[in-house]
Amino acid sequence: MAQEEEIKYFVRISNTDLDGTKPVHIALTGIPGVGMHTAQVIATLAKVDEKELMGRITDEDVDRIREVVDSYVSRVPPWMMNRPKDVYTGEPRHIFGTDVSMAREEDINIMRKIRCYKGIRHETGQKVRGQRTKSTGRTGLTVGVKRKKD
């Protein structure tokens, strides 16, 4: 009988609790701002087997993953970042964690402030990306045909 290793059910990386029962490249997508491609690149740069369960990798491997996540911007080309040209600085950036939601809200506020089409659509609560609105996306009271009472 082989001795079964203890599995860590939660691994903390970049202020996020990751599921230890999933493979490394899947678990890393639990960090906001990390998709499948970014997760595979992080696992490769950290020299960790991406198919291994997150809870079974050693503490040294977890530390290497943390280090790669912290230095991700300096290790990858600008086209691999989620903000290839930042609005304020013009520099390429990759944002993780709570910064993603804050940056998204800030972008929407800028669009509202400059009164662009997308900003006005956000303000009024309408669809922003060109979807149809005549028959779908209706909210509020139901409008229909009333039958006559006999």
Image (spheres, rainbow, N blue to C red):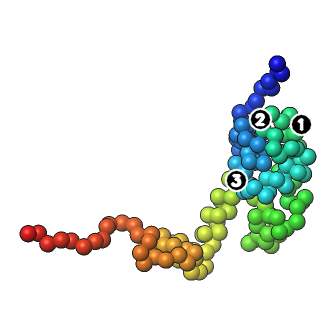
Q: Residues within 10 Å of mark 1 (few under 14, many from 20)?
A: few
Tell me which amino acid carries mark 3. Answer: Pro
Q: According to the image, label 2 marks what residue?
A: 55
What is the C-alpha distance between the residues marked 3 and 2? Answer: 19 Å
In the rendered image, the residue lying farthest to the top is 1
Kindly identify which numbered label has been placed on residue 60: 1
SS of the residue under disc 1: helix
Q: Earlier in the sequence, mark 3 or mark 2?
A: 3
Q: Residue at x 78, y 48 (%)?
A: 25
Q: Residues within 10 Å of mark 2 (few under 14, many from 20)?
A: many
What is the C-alpha distance between the residues marked 2 and 1? Answer: 13 Å
Position of the N terminus by quadrant: top right
Q: Are marks 3 and 2 in contact (CB under 8 Å)?
A: no
In the rendered image, the residue lying farthest to the front is 1
Tell me which amino acid carries mark 1. Answer: Glu
Q: Earlier in the sequence, mark 2 or mark 1?
A: 2
Examine the rendered structure and indicate whether residue 77 appears above or below residue 26.
below
Q: Residues within 10 Å of mark 3 (few under 14, many from 20)?
A: some
Tell me which amino acid carries mark 2. Answer: Gly
Q: Residue at x 41, y 75 (%)?
A: 135
The percent position of residue 79, horizontal first and vertical second, equals 83, 69
Q: Residue at x 8, y 69 (%)?
A: 150
| Callout count | 3
Kindly identify which numbered label has been placed on residue 32: 3
Is 150 placed left or right of 135 in the picture? Answer: left
Give the number of the mark in front: 2 or 1: 2
Q: Residue at x 79, y 58 (%)?
A: 37
The percent position of residue 38, horizontal first and vertical second, equals 79, 57
The percent position of residue 7, horizontal first and vertical second, equals 76, 30
Is 118 placed left or right of 97 in the picture? Answer: left
Q: Are marks 2 and 1 in contact (CB under 8 Å)?
A: no
